[in-house]
Image (tube, grey):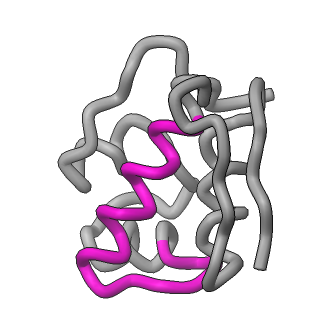
Amino acid sequence: MAAMHRHGARASDDVALLLAEPTVILWDLLEMDASGRLALLVVKAVRGRGFTGADAVEVFRTSAGLATDGLGPLACGALGVPVPAGVRWRS
């Protein structure tokens, strides 16, 4: 189990944390930044398609015929997840 209260992290780091643990405790959801909110939507989308575990995004990307270069606008688009302004992709 992990706990999550993060600000200023990359969206891919938040997704990795959420996918690595079967249970994650979140708090201050209303104050979560754009990257954290995007991470929740991405995890919901990949799990909804049956992809689980720490490598779920990469496995999804491969199955969708996308380059396996992590989380970015292309993967979000393929998942149907809108990207809010202010998302941190790289450090």
Q: Camera-side residue: 35 or 23?
A: 23
Whether 42 is among the magenta residues is yes
x, y (%) of residue 23?
A: 63, 79
Whether 84 is among the magenta residues is no
x, y (%) of residue 74?
A: 34, 42
Q: Is residue 19 left or right of residue 10?
A: left
* Residue 33 in which image quadrant: top right
* Residue 6 in which image quadrant: top right
x, y (%) of residue 84?
A: 38, 21
Q: In the rendered image, which quarter contains the C terminus?
A: top right
Q: Is residue 43 left or right of residue 46?
A: right
> Up-down: is 68 above or below 70?
below
x, y (%) of residue 24?
A: 66, 69
* Residue 62 in which image quadrant: bottom left
Q: Which residues are magenta?
A: 36-56
Q: Residue at x 63, y 65 (%)?
A: 18
For this orientation, the residue located farthest to the top is 85
Q: Is residue 35 left or right of residue 1?
A: left
Q: Residue at x 51, y 63 (%)?
A: 68
Q: Residue at x 25, y 42 (%)?
A: 77
Q: Main secondary structure of the magenta part?
A: helix
Q: In the rendered image, which quarter contains the N terminus?
A: bottom right
